[in-house]
Image: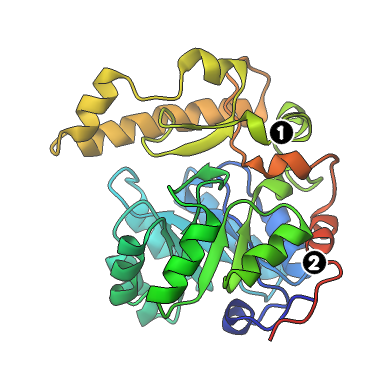
Amino acid sequence: MIKNTALTRMLGIEYPIIMAPMFLVSNTQMIIEGLKCGISGAIPALNYKTDSELRKAINEIKNASDKPFGINLIVNKSNPRYKQQLRAIIDLQVAYVITSLGDPKEVIRQCHQHGIKVFCDVVDLKIAQKVEKLGADALIAVNSVAGGHAGPFTASELIPMLKKHSNLPIISAGGVATHQQAMDVLNLGADGLSIGTPFIATNECKVSDDYKKAILSFGASDIVTTNKMSGSPLNVINTPYVQEIGTKANWLELILNKNRRLKKYAKMLILKQGMNTMEKAAFSATYKNVWVAGPGIEFIHEIKTVKEVVNSLMQYSSLLK
């Protein structure tokens, strides 16, 4: 089986997989099942609207398992609840934080004071070198085919680049839905995998049946990148509604995003509107379907359990040393 990488040693898990934090999609049941199977998992803090809901979710997982899991934290100014969410993470001693879309300096400083590890989303070498200097414990190397927020480089470009110029463990995010893809990415030099899309099509996932059916029926060619939902590149299924609204920011959004004084508020507005649209699409019947996914949907043809997904990713793997 795939074992003994920097990620498995760091977290004390059996397989070098993190169930990726997926906005609106990830839930405590999915994470708990993943922990039972020997992997880790993370949930976006933004999946919870209040501090008490976030704390309740963390405690639910901790009460069900002593295995390590993480919380994904948006650390830029578009997340007004960032400091409150960080306090909950520290108070409840979550094993690690995955930082996204901002400067992780303060998160690294505070978390390390309490023995909490910090993994940072990076999309290029410049950001990777910056967070390494700040003291990050690992890099989440977000590539161009990641479901959700994506970077400009493929895994075959990004991982060797980071491997050559960084001493941190590299966790590749994006483009893994099969055992062979998992092996290919690990053989590029990755120390672990952050995998999301295959876990959407599971019994434990609570998104709408329409969302799950879309994962099964659409293919890799149906994935497009949009800047309309969060102000950053986001990979989604090219539904009729996505085609209707387009994938490029309009002239007003471009102007606001380039204005230094207004950029913070523009991103907050775009993110809030995008979150509302995606929430309605994820859990209810609506023609405004914005379903986040990666091209790995090409290889997903049935609804499975979390355990079955983990087993299919790991089967017939050779021991890594």
* Disc 2 target residue: 314
The quadrant holding residue 58 is bottom right
Horizontally, residue 91 falls left or right of residue 207, namely left
Label 1 CA crowd tier, 10 Å (few <14, some 14–19, many 20+): some
Residue visible at 34% across and 67% down in the picture:
107
Helix, strand or loop at label 2? It is helix
Q: Earlier in the sequence, mark 1 or mark 2?
A: 1
Residue visible at 63% across and 81% down in the picture:
5
Q: Nearer the viewer, residue 88 or 316?
A: 316
Note whether 299 is above or below 276 in the view shown. below
* Tag of residue 164: none
Horizontally, residue 10 falls left or right of residue 272, namely right
Label 2 CA crowd tier, 10 Å (few <14, some 14–19, many 20+): many
Mark 1 and mark 2: Cα distance apart in space: 23 Å
The quadrant holding residue 237 is top right
For the C terminus, give its image quadrant.
bottom right
Q: Amino acid at mark 1?
A: Gly
User: Could you tell me residue 264's position as x and y percent?
Assistant: 23, 39
Horizontally, residue 174 falls left or right of residue 2, namely left
Note whether 34 is above or below 169 in the view shown. above
* Disc 1 target residue: 219
Q: Nearer the viewer, residue 190 or 76?
A: 190
For the N terminus, give its image quadrant.
bottom right
User: Could you tell me residue 232's position as x and y percent?
Assistant: 38, 39
The colour scheme used here is rainbow
User: Could you tell me residue 241's position as x and y percent?
Assistant: 56, 16
Q: Is residue 295 visible?
A: yes
Q: Amino acid at mark 2?
A: Met
